[in-house]
Amino acid sequence: MLTRRKFLQATAYTSLTGFISLKLSSCLPHSAPDKKNLPIVISTWDAGIEANKAAWDVLSHNGRALDAVEKGVMVTEASNSCCVGLNGNPDRDGIVTLDASIMDENFNCGGVADLKRIKHPISVARRVMEKTPHVLLVGEGAQQFAVAEGFTLEPEYLSPKATQNYQKWLKKSEYKPVINVENKGDTPIAVPAKMPDGSWNHDTIGMIAMDITGNLSGSCTTSGMAFKMHGRVGDSPIIGAGLYVDNEVGGCAATGQGEDVIRIGGAAIVVEFMRMGLSPRAACKKAIERIASVKKEKAKDIQVAFVALAKDGTVGAYALQKGFTYAVTTNEGAKFFNAHYHLKS
Ligand code: SD4
């Protein structure tokens, strides 16, 4: 039986452990980064290496993390990519629609979804953040805003590669999400692989950077899931799902099946796990485990991955399936990794 004394002891213990874990959680991720390890940038997939170069150009000249994450992913948006920017794969009606979001060190954030015929959705997302009282603009309204802001309305277009992919898809017209696998190797350090035509074989790009002053920002941009339903929006433009930054704790970007990232509030939950004291990789792993437990046997049919950067300057990533790659650039140079993953078959 729980006597009054035992009860008091138990509650004292609980409040003590509560106090300790509260103290731990409120000081661990808040520890300032060692200045000599700054700046730093992490991004998703093989194309991250090249995107990081543009981000590094900003960061290494004492630029702001926000400018770095915009400039960085613009490289991918302008590239001959299957899955980012206007060269990306279309939806099932043959139309390319783009999603993007950006977030700075002060919880300012902006996004665009279902945006057509604009080359740099990330820059429109930044304008939404800086010039409107809103966080997310979609479809026609997003395009009108972009044009009013001076962005060029590009011609309706499907790249040769996207046309080829679409024609192939039309034969069966199956609505079946494809698992993204870029490098099947299991080695801790891999080499990014270019396609035979010289383009990067990659997917959505998500990027988190910390500048020399210790401020964090993040960006995420994509043409979304190939052959999606017209009007479908994924996680990438949704703050808290595809991207989240809390300048006191860290930042996270997601890639993979957007529906399942949205379902668990992916990027925000990774940041919350870091706030509780987990390392970036452990935080990403915990979020992936949550998706795996939600999806049960269907987890094997999808891919989801997170990259994260904590306030102390540590980075990490974790994927549901084998094959997720990410790039990290620091004062020591650019490094490329195969992420650890959950489903070991
Ligand atoms: C989406 N998360 O639209 C994006 C797609 C992606 O790797 O990241 N694919 O759901």
Image (tube, rainbow, N blue to C red):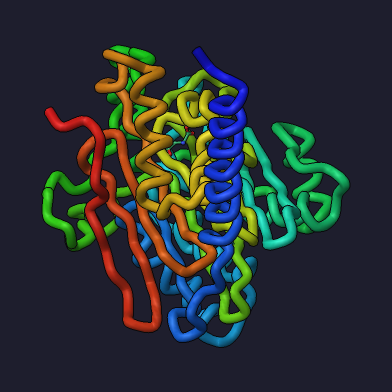
Residue 315 image offset from top left, x and y in percent: 40, 61
Q: Residue at x 24, y 40 (%)?
A: 341
Residue 113 image offset from top left, x and y in percent: 64, 36
For ligand 1, the image quadrant comes to top left
Residue 342 image offset from top left, x and y in percent: 25, 35
Q: Is residue 40 above or below residue 234?
A: below
Q: Nearer the viewer, residue 62 or 32?
A: 32
> 288 left or right of 38?
left
Q: Nearer the viewer, residue 150 or 320?
A: 320
Quadrant in the picture for the C terminus: top left
Residue 221 visible in the current orientation: no
Q: Residue at x 71, y 56 (%)?
A: 126
Q: Nearer the viewer, residue 322 or 143?
A: 322
Q: Is residue 275 above or below residue 287?
A: below
Residue 23 image offset from top left, x and y in percent: 59, 54
Residue 314 visible in the current orientation: yes
Q: Residue at x 28, y 24 (%)?
A: 168
Q: Residue at x 49, y 24 (%)?
A: 259
> 133 left or right of 214?
right
Q: How many marks?
A: 0
